[in-house]
Image (cartoon, grey):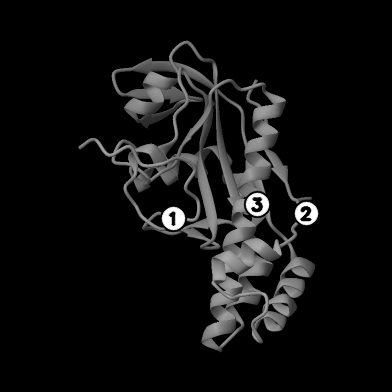
């Protein structure tokens, strides 16, 4: 019997002063800091971040792909890493529509930028909450993940698979997918969590610089 997706919306959201100061490059002694704190209080009061995940049984694996709950995912990394595993966990995490609408309501460049950074932090907070719950509840070893579009191994078109697995949960969270595979709210993340043969993080294979979500140093093949 297929399992139901787990939706998580009761995620506390507190913006760290030190994190904001570092991300915004605004010293706490700056005259602008009071405005940052005022916006932080607004963002925290709105909240609304959330996420969802679904335990999915792997039906079959082949050369460079897996089939899970009847859905084929072309990813050699996922196929090799989940060998002899039974479950994968498609997931979504989002800052939420209320917080996105709040950030988009600002017309001033500085306020808009600060608010956008706060929605990004909220999305990362939601992501950490979802991943932590999956890892703890299912006792994952070498807890790893792949994300559509992060590497050539699984392009952005893989978003369609995430939404096939989580379409009802995504609708409940207010997360939608555009025809060109972009999510709304923009500050949303998706992927597949799994217990890997070895620890795998896309970050180790991604050369992108200045990424706030980086979890591992880039391993330059050269």
Residue 128 visible in the displayed image: yes
Cα distance in 3D space between marks 1 and 3? 15 Å
Residue 221 at what x, y percent from top left? 24, 35
Mark number displayed over residue 102: none
Circle 3 crowding by C-alpha within 10 Å: few under 14, some 14–19, many from 20: many
Give the image location of residue 147, x and y in percent: 44, 41
Q: Residue at x 53, y 23 (%)?
A: 142
54 left or right of 60 in image: right
Q: Secondary structure at mark 3?
A: helix
Q: Secondary structure at mark 2?
A: loop
Task: List x then y, in percent, for residue 64.
Answer: 30, 23
User: Is 183 situated left or right of 208 in this image?
Assistant: right
* Residue 5 makes an appearance in the image: no
Query: What is the quadrant of the C terminus in the image?
Result: top left
Looking at the picture, tell me which residue is in the foreground, 152 or 53: 152
In space, the residues marked 2 and 1 are separated at their CA atoms by 24 Å
Q: Is residue 17 above or below residue 74?
A: below
Q: Give the camera-side residue of 114 and 178.
A: 114
- Counting residues from the start of the chain, the first of labels 1 and 3 encountered is 3
Disc 1 designates what residue?
Answer: 211
Question: How many other residues sit within 10 Å of disc 2, few (<14), some (14-19) or many (≥20)?
Answer: some
| Numbered tag placed on residue 125 in the rendering | 3
Residue denoted by label 2: 12
Dot 2 or dot 3, earlier in sequence: 2
Residues at discs 1 and 3 in contact (Cβ within 8 Å):
no
**Mark 1 crowdedness (10 Å alpha carbons): few <14, some 14-19, many ≥20:** few
Quadrant assignment, res 37: bottom right
């Amino acid at each position: 019997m297929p399992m139901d997706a787990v939706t998580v919306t009761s995620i506390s959201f507190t913006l760290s002063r030190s994190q904001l100061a570092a991300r915004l490059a605004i010293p706490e002694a700056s005259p602008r800091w009071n405005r940052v704190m005022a916006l932080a209080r607004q963002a925290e009061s709105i909240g609304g971040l959330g996420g969802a995940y679904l335990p999915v049984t792997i039906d079959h694996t082949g050369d460079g792909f897996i089939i899970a709950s009847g859905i084929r995912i072309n990813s050699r990394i996922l196929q090799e890493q989940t060998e002899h595993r039974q479950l994968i966990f498609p997931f979504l995490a989002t800052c939420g529509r209320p917080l996105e609408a709040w950030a988009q309501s600002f017309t001033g460049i500085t306020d808009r930028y600060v608010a956008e950074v706060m929605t990004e932090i909220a999305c990362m907070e939601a992501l950490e909450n979802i991943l932590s719950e999956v890892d703890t509840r299912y006792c994952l070893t070498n807890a790893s993940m792949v994300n559509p579009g992060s590497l050539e191994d699984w392009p952005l078109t893989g978003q369609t698979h995430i939404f096939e697995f989580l379409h009802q949960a995504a609708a409940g969270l207010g997360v939608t997918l555009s025809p060109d595979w972009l999510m709304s709210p923009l500050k949303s993340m998706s992927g597949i969590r799994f217990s890997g043969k070895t620890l795998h993080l896309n970050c180790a294979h991604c050369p992108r610089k200045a990424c706030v979500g980086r979890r591992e140093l880039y391993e330059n093949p050269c």
